[in-house]
Image: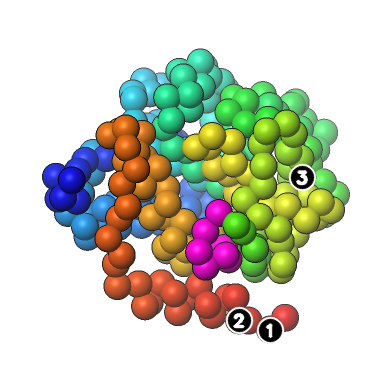
Amino acid sequence: MEESNLSISIAHLYPKLLNLYGDMGNVITLIKRCEWRGINVDFEQINVGDAIKDHDLYFIGGGQDKQQEEVAQELFSHKSELIAQRDSGAVFLGICGGYQLFGHYYQPHDKEKLTGISLMDAYTVAGKNRFIGNVTVKTNLLEPKTLVGFENHSGLTYLQGETKPLGLVSVGHGNNGTDGFEGARFKNVFGTYLHGSLLPKNPHFADMLIELALEKRYGYKITLQPLEDKLEWDAHNSVVNKSY
Ligand code: GLN
């Protein structure tokens, strides 16, 4: 089908609370990479108190523990709907604090445990140190096999069962600074600690997420036409080739 006859619906979950380091740049990237191809985008921001409608792709950003607390309660009230969306093949991308809430729980320092929505089999506990800095990940999910970004978290995330990492950290700390893993995937649910924002510098990941969301909507694999991404790859490679 001609890309200009395609549509996709994208929801940004709780942008007023979880949007650390301009994580909404990921949503802007997804929308622009669709619009540049003539794909029609239905977009909505979902805030506290709003209903959660069916979408092809859901995005949630990162934030401080306080904002995470408010979002955790709201997200949990929609847990069954969001699990149903996951099981229907909807794509999710969660960054840092949002990623942590995709798991079973986030246990901050000396505070109540935040219950997650268990979209993936993972859990997070607050660590003693804060991991801050550039990250390069080696991944078999994408070509080229690198993902780049910036991390700033104290949470340590551990994956279990069928939830697998996005890749292995070659620079930075990743999920917990010990198992070498960064990020996570279960079905079409993706989580990562990579701020930046992530997708402008990782166009291959952005396009993979769009293709998965289109496949969920239309029921068959759709391969997107490549875009002229010189700027995006220059930014990506400037991080990959950085000497530390
Ligand atoms: N508050 C969480 C942590 O520090 C998430 C922070 C973030 O979203 N950058 O681990």
Task: Determine the CA span between mark 1 and mark 2.
Answer: 6 Å
* Camera-nearest residue between 102 and 44: 102
* Camera-nearest residue between 53 and 16: 53
Question: Disc 2 marks which amino acid?
Answer: Asn
Q: Is residue 127 left or right of residue 116?
A: right
Query: Pointer 3: what residue?
Result: 156
- Which residue is found at the position 65% from the left and 63% from the top? 138
Q: Secondary structure at mark 2?
A: loop
- CB under 8 Å between callouts 3 and 1? no
- CB under 8 Å between callouts 3 and 2? no
Task: Determine the CA span between mark 3 and mark 1.
Answer: 26 Å
Question: Disc 3 marks which amino acid?
Answer: Leu
In this rendering, is residue 130 above or below 77?
A: below
Q: How many other residues sit within 10 Å of disc 2, few (<14), some (14-19) or many (≥20)?
A: few
Q: Toward which corner of the image does residue 118 lie, by quadrant? A: top right
What residue range appears in magenta?
141-147
Task: Determine the CA span between mark 3 and mark 2.
Answer: 27 Å
Query: Pointer 1: what residue?
Result: 243
- CB under 8 Å between callouts 1 and 2? yes
Q: Is residue 17 visible?
A: no
Question: Disc 1 marks which amino acid?
Answer: Ser
Q: Select label 3 or label 1 by which is in front.
A: 1
Question: Mark 1 or mark 3, which is nearer the start of the sequence?
Answer: 3
Q: Toward which corner of the image does residue 109 lie, by quadrant? A: top right
- Which residue is found at the position 32% from the left and 32% from the top? 219
Query: Pointer 2: what residue?
Result: 241
Q: Is residue 50 left or right of residue 188?
A: left
| Dominant secondary structure (helix, strand or loop) of the stretch shown in magenta | loop
